[in-house]
Amino acid sequence: MKLLISFFLIIISFLASAQSNKNSQPLEILFIAAAHDYGAKPIEDFSYPINKALAFKPDAVFGENLSPEDYDALDRHWNKEAIDKRLAYLTKIGYPLPKHPQAFIARQYKLLRKYPYYHQERMKLAHALYLTHDFGNASYQFYLLDKLRPAFGAEEIAAFTQILGPVDSLKNVGFRRSNEYYNIFHPIAQSLKLDKIMPMDCQKYNTPWSAAWEKTDSLYKLFEKGIEADTNSADYKTYLRLNTENNELQRLLNKANQAGKSTAFLNTADWDKYTDFGNFYGNRYLFGLKNFPEEGVRDMLKYWTLRNEGMCQNIVDRARKIGAKRVVVGVGASHRELMVKLLKEMPGVTVYTLNEYQP
């Protein structure tokens, strides 16, 4: 009996040690901040971030998407009304979701690994992914189909219409050619022959964040009106100095956009400060000024930090779960400064920002 107990204790100790090692396994991250919209006709050719990502040779690419489980767990979502309309659009088309969708999705991935040009099977996969709320990976499949579309024959166009609607109607499910996924992260994943984009967003704090933002926005308008009424005050001079600096940063951003170097600029300290001004009403730079809504801004920062902490934890946990050693993280540029800081503080994690990384 003692021998049996000792055996089980050894097994438990071994499993605990293995889990501990997995939780602390080294992870390298190439962090790429990007714009959510580059416009209908981008000037940038996007080779700069794409080539760096491919040289990094990642095992996975993470995007600012929710996992289906995280989406389903939310009581509210900032974009729920639009998502519900998109789901209703696909449902109305009438193509049925398989009885066991997760098993079907797994089979489709396996099939497409072997036969990537089975376009109709990819259409079915995209349809099932969207209706099971894996919006990030449905979008990736829409991207692949969009790129393959010129090769479609009459039969494939008919199948597309039957499963997803008319071939030019993917905008009805939120597909956009102007965003960071279409222009940067989906091409990276496609070049690496990855099946999926890994989700990492965290929206658990959306409700209190929205409340804090709405409160602060209304109070800031009153603050702005009051401070601009007395242009001789010391507070106004501080406010004016901040606005002047903000305008200069806007000029630098415009210059980068015109030169086709938007993404490079979005990965700089200048951008971090510019977005800090804009997203948080001047942030700490205006703390202490009369009637400035400091409490509201601090609440915004609290929930913003919690969201970004959740995103970072998702990246690290999910990367380690699949055994990834190197990953590319693609995220809206306003997250850059805080997420890079948080990730660098996590044990076993090494972070390279886009501009500093040299292959």
Image: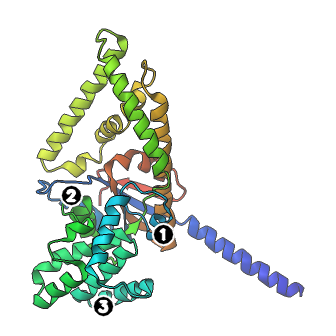
Instruction: Between residue 352 and residue 130, name the one nearer to us.
Output: 130
Amino acid type, callout 1: Glu
x, y (%) of residue 248?
Answer: 21, 30
The picture quadrant where one finds residue 117 is bottom left
Instruction: Between residue 133 and residue 337, name the one nearer to us.
Output: 133
Mark 2 Cα within 10 Å, few/some/many (few <14, many 20+)? some
The picture quadrant where one finds residue 118 is bottom left
**Vertical arrangement, residue 53 with respect to residue 343, above or below:** below
Q: Which mark is residue 114?
A: 3
Q: Nearer the viewer, mark 2 or mark 1?
A: 1
Q: Which mark is residue 48?
A: 2
Say whether marks 3 and 1 touch (CB < 8 Å).
Answer: no
**Vertical arrangement, residue 139 with respect to residue 291, above or below:** below
Amino acid type, callout 3: Lys
Mark 3 secondary-structure assignment? helix
Q: Nearer the viewer, mark 3 or mark 1?
A: 1
Q: CA distance from mark 2 to mark 1?
A: 34 Å
Q: Is residue 58 visible?
A: no
Mark 3 Cα within 10 Å, few/some/many (few <14, many 20+)? few
Q: Is residue 155 visible?
A: yes
Q: Which mark is residue 6?
A: none
**Which of the colour schemes (rainbow, by chain, secondary structure, one colour) is used?**
rainbow
Q: Is residue 44 left or right of residue 270?
A: left
**Vertical arrangement, residue 261 with respect to residue 97, above or below:** above
Q: CA distance from mark 3 to mark 1?
A: 28 Å
Earlier sequence position, callout 2 versus callout 1: 2
The residue wearing badge 1 is 69
**Quarter of the rendering occupied by the N terminus:** bottom right
x, y (%) of residue 153?
Answer: 10, 88
Q: Residue at x 73, y 81 (%)?
A: 11
Earlier sequence position, callout 3 versus callout 1: 1
x, y (%) of residue 315?
Answer: 46, 62
